[in-house]
Image: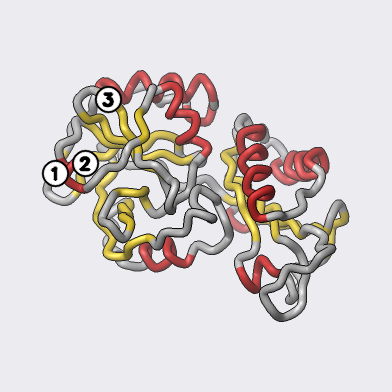
Amino acid sequence: MTTAAMNQARVFRGDQRIDALSPFDRGHAYGDGLFETLRAHRGQLPWWDAHWARLSRGAQRLRLALPDQDCVREQAAAMLDGADAVLKLILSRGEGGRGYAPPAQARPIWVLSRHPLPPAAPASGLTLRWCDLRLSEQPALAGLKHCNRLEQVLARAEWDDPAIDEGLLRDRAGEVVCATAANVFALIDGQWRTPPLDRCGVAGVCREFLLEIAQARVERLNPEDLQRAEAIFLCNAVRGILPVARLGERQWAPHPALAGLRHRLGAAHPAFVPVAD
């Protein structure tokens, strides 16, 4: 299937499909919305419930109206049509006039789009860099996958070296938060650890799953902690677990603790079943 055939989008107002996104859409104008990015396996969405639960929590915090879940899932299945793909769901507050005040009776606008799978990660592991950009702190938005991603856009624009796979982000205090498009875990003194996301960053669906199966500890980490880690990996709901091989001058060989996590992740989501060596 060609890339053009994979890249499809449908726009809805409430439960009705419309031709195009309104020029007065608040998601477009202000980032007044949320989104979910899901990995589809043979047209199925194994983590649908987890994604919808996160979307619902975010909608409650932002006071956004949710569309009918059954309608969204039915449209998603039709769009996927049995494919291995990435499905993106964007939820906007809806249409509104100029100005920040949200309309009292907004009808949600939501967009479904289907995209090709990303390239496979390097078998040797990812090479990371530190981003210069520091994430701003806003507890009211911390953890949410909201539609304002300008910080991530600017951070990702810092490099065009194909040898660099991802960049790590810190907050204003210099503590580790996440990568530009993934959460981060570090094995330190035999214990998996991941930064809290109470001030900034996105609480990923894959992170939530791995917190439990890895019995990970949530605690603040600084760059020195990562340098002394026995292993590091990134994770997100599209690519699963991504072992890190290098950060600056520090290098890591494959760690046996990662193999067990990857097999347990594959048991929960068939798209992430490890490829046999």
Distance between the Cα atoms at labels 3 and 2? 13 Å
Image quadrant in which the C terminus is located: top left
The quadrant in which residue 135 appears is: bottom left
Nearer to us: label 1 or label 2: 2
Q: Amino acid at mark 3?
A: Gln
Q: How far apart are labels 1 and 3 at the CA level?
A: 19 Å
Give above or below for 171 relative to 26: above
Q: Is residue 163 left or right of residue 6?
A: left
> In the image, what residue type sits under mark 2?
Leu
Q: CA distance from mark 1 to mark 2?
A: 9 Å
Regarding mark 1 in the picture, which secondary structure is present there? Answer: strand
Residue 264 is situated, as x and y percent measured from the top left of the image, at 44, 20
Q: Is residue 5 visible?
A: no
The residue that disc 1 covers is: 250
Which residue is rendered at x = 39% and y = 42% of the image?
A: 196
Element assignment for label 2: helix
Visual colour scheme = secondary structure
